[in-house]
Amino acid sequence: MRIVVLAGGVGGARMADGFARAVLPEDLTVIVNTGDDFEWHGLLVCPDLDTVMYTLAGIANPETGWGIQGDTWGALEMLGRYGGETWFRIGDRDLATHVYRTFLLRQGLRLSEVTARLCRALGVRAAIWPMSDEPVRTIVETEEGPLPFQEYFVRRGCQPRVRSFRWEGLEGARLSPEARAALEGADLVVIAPSNPYVSIGPILALPGVRELLQDRTVVAVSPIIGGQALKGPAAKMMAELGEAPSALGVARCYRSFLDGFVLDRADAALAPAVEAMGIRPLVTDIVILDPSARARLAEEILRWVAS
Ligand code: FO1
């Protein structure tokens, strides 16, 4: 069974890790949001790609979910002494990823090719592809005006109220050829428990992706439990956009192509409403902090889809 996971953020990386533990590497492709990418002191940083890559390589920082375990901050401290901005915390080892990625891009490689090289070097055997080789940048329209994603997320700690989102560069962007081939050949597409607006939204905004999903078996895992996001601002964003923050609201975002929806036991009461939308519900434990829980959830989803 060829599985494609659509992922962004720490929740996406953890779900991808679960499938990496449950299936053969050649059967797994992870398509990752690049709307969070940005230029940091002249280097291209791809936080979601790196979070998935480090998690599958077994070197992610287990406390934050992003960055590298045991990383140090010497370069950042020195940058601060020069008067450079240090609100986005890049560790010393993580820095090497951005230096080398930017170097390879300047040699003319596509972001997909660069990502494949980095993954190979770190021993990651499943395929990880950026959603697009062309730059797409999430802009958060807030009540204080437009903010580039990381300015909103890290610098402003998600404080300004959200009005809407837009994606710079979308008109010139397309699904990367590798990601398209994987989706076309997928037996199952899993939308990870990622933020539906800023992690999955950019992937779905690419031309042709929603149409491709309509022809495939697609299941999504809720990033919301009991009205709270497992991590990050998804529930806050839903409330500010006038949508009740609940797993049901997430199912609604995907309803035009969704076949199944996985909710936590705490939200079992919502299952009939999911079914009423014509979507098959699976109620189980969806907190996947540790690797064994990730693998268990992935295996349970595979058994459920097969049945
Ligand atoms: N998140 C933070 O909240 N603060 C940081 O300083 C920060 C640095 C960082 C560096 C590299 C990286 O790959 C991710 C980093 N993140 C940080 C996480 C990142 O902003 C978010 O995970 C995503 O962009 C949201 O999906």
Image (cartoon, rainbow, N blue to C red):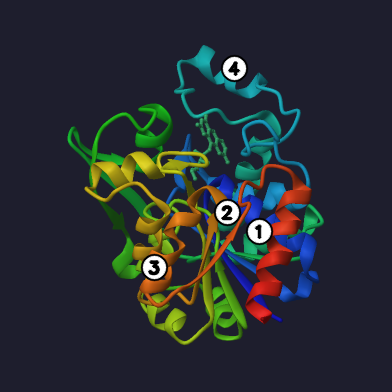
- The amino acid sitting under disc 2 is Gly
Q: Which residue is drawn at 68% across and 39% down?
A: 96
Q: Does the residue labelled 1 lie within 8 Å of ligand 1?
A: no
**What residue would you read off at disc 1?**
16
Count all numbered tags in the image, as a single digit.
4
Q: Position of residue 296 (x, y in %)?
A: 74, 57
**What residue would you read off at disc 4?**
78
Q: Position of residue 165 (x, y in %)?
A: 27, 51
Picture layout, residue 25 above or below residue 154: below
Q: What element carries label 2?
A: helix
Q: Residue at x 70, y 35 (%)?
A: 61
Position of the N terminus, as image quadrant, is bottom right
Q: In this orientation, which residue lies closer to the viewer: 182 or 74? A: 182
Q: Does the residue labelled 3 lie within 8 Å of ligand 1?
A: no
Q: How far apart are marks 2 and 3 (CA)?
A: 16 Å
Local packing at callout 2 (Cα closer than 10 Å; few below 14, some 14-19, many 20+) is many
**What residue would you read off at disc 3?**
254
Front: mark 1 or 3: 3
* Quadrant position of residue 299: bottom right
Q: Which residue is drawn at 48% across and 66% down?
A: 132
Q: What element carries label 1?
A: helix
Q: Which residue is drawn at 65% across and 50% down?
A: 14
Taking 95 as reference, is 299 left or right? Answer: right
**What residue would you read off at disc 2?**
12
- The amino acid sitting under disc 1 is Ala
Position of the C terminus, as image quadrant, is bottom right
> Are discs 1 and 3 less than 8 Å apart at CB?
no
Q: What element carries label 4?
A: helix
Disc number for residue 110: none
- The amino acid sitting under disc 3 is Tyr
Q: What element carries label 3?
A: helix
Q: Where is residue 155 in the image (x, y as percent from the top left)?
A: 39, 28
